[in-house]
Amino acid sequence: MRTPVIAGNWKMNNTIAAAEKLIGELKPLVKDAKAEVVICVPYTAIQKAAELTRGTNIKVGAENVAWADKGAFTGEISAEMLKEVGAEYVIIGHSERRQMFGETDETVCMRTAQALKNGLKPIVCVGETLAEREGNKTEEVVKRQTEGAFKGLAAADLDNVIIAYEPVWAIGTGKTATAEQANETIKYIRSVVSSLYGKATADKLRIQYGGSMNPANASSLMAPPDIDGGLIGGASLKAEDFSKVVNY
Ligand code: PEP
């Protein structure tokens, strides 16, 4: 049995003070969650979030990580730095990074390897655009992104990886994939992992759905057998909404 994991992606939202308020409200609301709970927060809020969630069932993550150990990479942040302030997880290859900041399958792969090398658990995002879905390219795209992200990794590395299947057309748009569409693509991604690493590894791997998941649609999106939780953007910014998704 795979334990579902519900991860919030705060994106570029919440100062330290706002993070303190949100986490304070969230803690009692999710304390009995059956799913694993993660909040991925801006770099500046990681240390405070880690302090405030110590001893609770909420884990903290970052939203990106550099592919190098250290050095001349202005604006980047290293895995060691993220670990130092208490991050356990890190989102890699989010579609906003791919679309606006030039993230490629190669850089996603390098960042994923670097996270794993340093004991950070990557949440690797894959997903097709609307044009790709309409052009019947969904499988081709998620296969390329999945194979690209994991190049050079061993099967044992996959134990510490989560994939988030996020159709780009569903992120922040209010449009969600149907549970059937999400499950079908996630099942396909699992088959890609199975051909790379074998069925046992693929069966253990947690694959989330992400894209406008909210309290109203969470339980139906979480129902199909291949969907192992969610990556939640907008609805993770309000404690009540996020807790309702967590406690779907
Ligand atoms: C996301 O950014 O990963 C996401 C799924 O956003 P939203 O829930 O707002 O669509």
Image (spheres, rainbow, N blue to C red):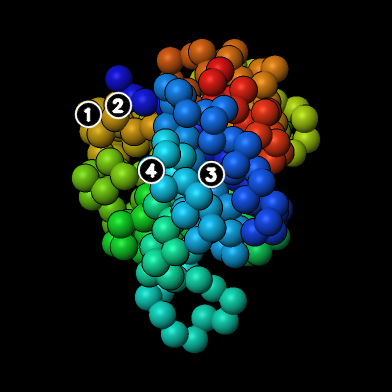
- The residue sitting at 59% across, 35% down in the picture is 26
Q: Amino acid at mark 2?
A: Asp
Q: Position of residue 232 (x, y in %)?
A: 61, 36
Residue 146 appears in the rendering: no
In the displayed structure image, the side of residue 187 where residue 30 appears, left or right: right
Q: Relative to 102, is 186 above or below? A: above
Between disc 4 and disc 2, the foreground one is 4
Mark 4 C-beta to ligand 1 under 8 Å = no
Mark found first going from the N terminus, 2 or 3: 3
Between disc 4 and disc 1, the foreground one is 4
Between disc 3 and disc 1, the foreground one is 3
Instruction: Give the alpha-carbon distance from disc 1 to disc 2, as whole Å.
Output: 5 Å
Q: Residues within 10 Å of mark 4 (few under 14, many from 20)?
A: few
Image quadrant for the N terminus?
A: top left
Q: How many marks?
A: 4
- The residue sitting at 25% across, 34% down in the picture is 201
Q: Residues within 10 Å of mark 3 (few under 14, many from 20)?
A: many
Instruction: Give the alpha-carbon distance from disc 3 to disc 1, as whole Å.
Output: 28 Å
Identify the residue position indicated by label 3 in the image: 39
Front one among 81 and 205? 81
Image quadrant for the C terminus?
A: top right
Q: Position of residue 35 (x, y in %)?
A: 44, 26
Identify the residue position indicated by label 4 in the image: 55
Q: Position of residue 55 (x, y in %)?
A: 38, 43
- The image's mark for residue 203 is 2
Q: Amino acid at mark 1?
A: Ala
- The image's mark for residue 200 is 1
Q: Amino acid at mark 3?
A: Ile
